[in-house]
Image (cartoon, helix red, strand yellow):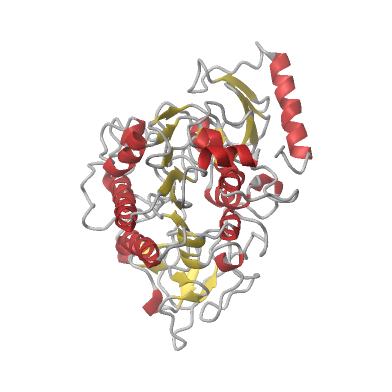
Amino acid sequence: MVGLILGGALTAWAEKPDIVLIYGDDVGFGDLGCYGAAGLATPNLDRLAKEGLRFTDAHSTSSTCTPSRYSLLTGEYAWRRKGTGILPGDAALIIEPGRTTFGSILQRAGYSTAVVGKWHLGLGNGSIAWNGEIRPGPLEVGFGHAFIMAATGDRVPTVYIENRRVVGAEDSDPIEVSYKAKIGSEPTGRENPELLKMHPSHGHDQTIVNGVSRIGYMSGGKSARWVDEEMADTFAARAVRFIEAQRAEPFFLYLATHGIHVPRVPHPRFAGRSGMGPRGDAILELDWTVGEVLAALEKRGRKALVLFSSDNGPVLDDGYKDQAVELLGSHQPAGPLRGGKGGIYEGGTRVPFLVWWPGRVKPGVSDALVSQVDLLASFAALTGQELGPEDAPDSVNVLPALLGDQAAGREFLVEHSGVLALRQGHWKYIEPSKGPAVTQTQVETGYHPTGHLFHLGGDLGERESLVAKNPEKMRDMAEKLDQIRKNPRSRP
């Protein structure tokens, strides 16, 4: 099978393509112009869609960040592993060093690899000395270079880490981090709201950095702390620097942007431009980042394969009063889909997915069912790498679909929030569950004591549950999901 795919993918190329994966954060299915957003200008992302392949049924594996990133890099559904929920900023690394990952499989194929941006997969072994060497981390799981933030912009520590060291850290001002109790004398959003330039709507009221209160407590590291308004510029510049430093060998760049996650504090160049407040402005800034990467690739002049997607669906009020709800207008972040970040409806995991490879991938639109968990197996096939029986247990080779050579993708897909759902063709089964109907961020969860059955072919918005009308289909899909859960792998 690998040989056949290589014959269709790489034989015609004298050189392996450079590969860039741009991974947005909380970008909804309807947030980009190429997916129907009429009120936002996203020319660089729209260019990828116009000149490449735009997918309409592509998914992250989870409706929240850490588990999606874990699945993306390991080829394993995160719900199979304990400890893969949303991590604090001082969590230990949750990918075992030496394990086959998206990065290591390309390293074996001769690629120089780097990760820039949001990591959120843990660092170290459980107790991090932030002013010393931090390991294990990205360099132990497939990346030759790393310039990252440990978790998210709304969590401490608010510093950048290059390879194994905090950038700008000074021994005279040691960094300490705690998610259990307050440390030091740093002001907090709860105690000192007068110091804030952006106020929390719920939570997010602990240590203040750059006028924004965060989740968790931090002291020290004054010279190392980031400036939120400069974050997109910093990550874009580091990505471009890596691209420009490459020579003849091909490279893989995993650029995990902070945009459009909270706190949304875009650079003054973008502030106020969208008319939708900081969330809309952050989308424009994200599009600019894509443009910077494309310009660097074109200057390099080699064949390049660029993918763009998001870790989960959209959310409006995610902890800060930034007028995301009040200034939304007619914009629909999830497009025609129901739900969003944190929910099991399609809006939680069906995300933008663009594949751009000029001269190889023909422009068009694909309704193939694909998942980010499939990228590892697919790129192993692209580069002629063999996977061992323990590697990437849930990653399916869908390379023909990704390259537009085949209309069909996966046969089935498991979606995940706090519960699981199974997709087979247009059918979707959501398992029974207990829990709130709406998340704290006002997203519909899809939780229901008897579960749900939908046929998305005529009900993309998941409004009519067919449990009573199709009990046999419901039972069949429940049994299939149970089999997948009990079996340690779903890869053929």
Residue 366: x, y in percent? 46, 28
Please identify the quadrant where the N terminus is shown: top right
Tell me: residue 135, above or below residue 22.
below
Residue 402: x, y in percent? 50, 37
Looking at the picture, tell me which residue is in the foreground, 210 or 106. 106
Judge left or right: residue 467 versus residue 159: right
Residue 170: x, y in percent? 43, 84
- What residue is drawn where x is 56% and y is 56%? 106
- What residue is drawn where x is 63% and y is 41%? 3
Judge left or right: residue 367 versus residue 325: right
Please identify the quadrant where the C terminus is shown: top right
Q: Tell me, yes or no, if residue 194 can be seen here.
A: yes
Looking at the picture, tell me which residue is in the foreground, 372 or 440. 372
The image shows a total of numbered marks equal to 0
Tell me: residue 429, above or below residue 172.
above
Q: Residue furthest bottom?
A: 172
**Image quadrant where residue 330 sits:** top left
Q: Residue furthest top?
A: 469
Judge left or right: residue 141 versus residue 366: right
Residue 108: x, y in percent? 60, 59
Looking at the picture, tell me which residue is in the foreground, 387 or 153. 387
Q: Tell me, yes or no, if residue 439 can be seen here.
A: no
